[in-house]
Every structure is written in structure tokens, then in C-alpha cells.
Amino acid sequence: MKTLGVLILCAFSFTARAQDSPALKLTRTIPLPGVKGRFDHFAIDAKGHRLFVAALGNNTLEVLDIAAGKMIKSITKLHKPTGVIYNSASNEIGVANGDDGTFQVFEGTAYSLVRKLDSLDDADNVRVDSKTKLTYIGYGAGALAVLDAASMKQIGSIKLPAHPEAFQLETFGNRIYVNVPDAKLVAVIDREKKAVIATWPMTQFKANFPMALDEANHRLFVGCRRPAKVLVFDTSTGKESASLDIVGDTDDLFFDAARKRLYVSGGEGYVDVIQEQDAGRFARIAHVATAAGARTSLYVAEQSRLYLAVPHRGSQKAEIRIYEAR
């Protein structure tokens, strides 16, 4: 009877795995030989078919040719690279460094350093305002730095109660939503006033790191690690409208507006695909097995692709896995 139970369990596990493929299919793997340690954030050069990967534990920025499926450059001598942005207009790559508190800008052909800003202790996530072209960098014991990217001068700082993790900027509005896990809250910033205008407490769910915004439907998705949940907030009211079970140790979360889906990557070794069934009702439709520690990812809507970083651990080799959303 015990053996039969094990066989049934194995059969169920195999069936569940097989059902993952319709939502998210692995199409390519790009090896990262010699890259060690954990990864942080990504940026994409869609036109140039390049992916920029912050290899935080390796102190490098890895540049990949995603069309050819190979590494083309490793920018070295960085100091715990975290946030990454790519400016297609100037062909420049910006990299925040958490260890030495710098934001460095590299030319995108020769990959030479062209500008550097200091004094951003524990620099982390980076975002660019599509309207004003201002750059925002989370840093220190609690602030967003505001940079004029052209002059590389810091023109402002928005105070927060603790170190910021993921944050999202509205495209049509003026708000910035910021995860502040050490303060157990989500902060809402008016970027014209450069000030926090509301805080949404995280009471039952803690360690809120990743975040995704569905601006059109006034929803903010917040990923938590303790316990492993995604919370759905109504951005009009600041009220929590739903909570969903997810993979453990999540670090990245994306909303696919075309398919009305969430993609959640976690270090537990899975990517969850959560589908909106109807207005406000969600269900996990796939629990895709990946690799231990593979919690960093990037979803590119224009390509319908999810890029996932797998760290080197023992016999597990560092690589980027490319999944196609279907």
C-alpha cells in the first residue's frame, strides 16, 4: 500500500510537471562559464538583442547576445552590482553598485566607463521615468535618489523609513510605489512633490521584496517571502483585495497584461504562473521546476519571454534560461 501511494504521488508530480509547458516553455539556455555567486537585476536591449545581467556575487555585469545564445562581454571590477538600466537612445548601460555606493555608466559598444556618481550607499534598484527621463535609485538606510542622467548629478532625494527594495513608477500618473520590508510597509510617493503621501502597512505578510504594477486596472502586486504570498492592492484605495500562494524565496514578479498573468520566480526552485480567471479572481496554472536559487528574472512583454538566472551551486552550472510565454 505504501509503494502504491508513492507511485500515485510520483504520477501526480509528473502530470503536474507536464501541465506546465502550455503556459511557459523553455526554449534556450545560455551558459555563464566562470560566473559564481548570486545574481541581481537585468536590463534588456531589445533592438540589439542583448541582455545585461548583474552578477552580484561575481562583481561583474554579464552582457549576453540572446540571438546567438552566448556571452559577449563581462564588465569586471564592479562592487556588488545590483540595479541595471539600458538607455537605447544613448546606447549606455547604467549599473548601481551596492558595495561602493556608485552608479556607473558604460558606453554600450566598447563598454568603457564614461560617467560615475558616488555617495549612494547600498545602491540597489534603478528605474527611469519615461516622461521626464529622470533616474531613480533606491539606496542607503531609506531613500530614493533622483538623478539627471545626462549630467549625472543628483538633483534630489526622497526620504523613506528604511532601505527600499523593488519600486514601480506610474506611466500616466505621478506616483511611485516602493517596497520597504524593514519598515513593514509599502510607501506611496508623489514624484512631483518628492515626498511620501501614503503608507500601506504589511501586517500579516512580511519580507515584501518584488513588485509589479497593473496601472490600467489600478492594481499593485506585492511579493512576500514570509509567508510565500502575492498580495493584490487596489491603488485607488490602498486596500488589499486578494492574497495568493506562491513559490518560496521570491525575488522577481511580473504582470503580463496581454495574457492577464503573473510570473513569479523564487529561490525554492520554481516559477509560478498565476492566471486571472475573471475580475479579481486568480489561480496558479503552472509551477515550473527550475533550479535551486534561481530567483532572479526579467519578463519582456514585447518578446513574450521570461529570462531566468540560475546560479552556480555545486554541480549546478550558472546559466540564463529563456522561457516563452504561451
Image (cartoon, grey):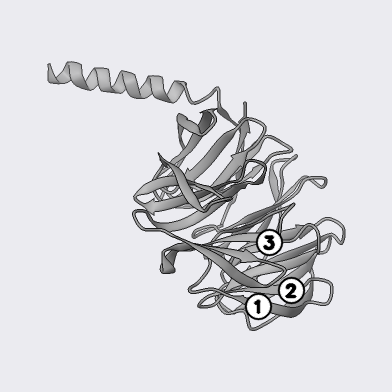
Q: Considering the numbered disc 2 on the image, is that residue within a helix, a strand or a loop?
A: strand
| Three-letter code for the amino acid on which mark 3 is drawn | Arg
Quarter the C terminus occupies: top right
Q: What's the residue at 63%, 30% (across, down)?
A: 259
Q: Of marks 2 and 1, which one's residue comes earlier in the chain?
A: 2
Q: Is residue 280 left or right of residue 207?
A: right
Give how far across and how far down residue 53 sits, in percent.
64, 55
Q: Of marks 3 and 1, which one's residue comes earlier in the chain?
A: 3
What number of labels is visible? 3
The quadrant holding residue 169 is bottom right
Q: What's the residue at 51%, 34% (across, down)?
A: 280
Q: Of marks 2 and 3, which one's residue comes earlier in the chain?
A: 3
Give how far across and how far down residue 214 sits, in percent.
62, 44
Q: Which mark is residue 127?
A: 3
Looking at the picture, tell me which residue is in the foreground, 317 or 13: 13
**From what the image shows, is residue 285 above or below residue 166?**
above
Q: Nearer the viewer, mark 2 or mark 1?
A: 1
Q: Residues within 10 Å of mark 1 (few under 14, many from 20)?
A: some
Q: CA distance from mark 2 to mark 1?
A: 9 Å
Task: Identify residue for label 2.
Answer: 147
Q: Which mark is residue 62?
A: none
Q: Is residue 181 left or right of residue 254?
A: left
Q: Considering the numbered disc 3 on the image, is that residue within a helix, a strand or a loop?
A: strand
Q: Residues within 10 Å of mark 3 (few under 14, many from 20)?
A: some
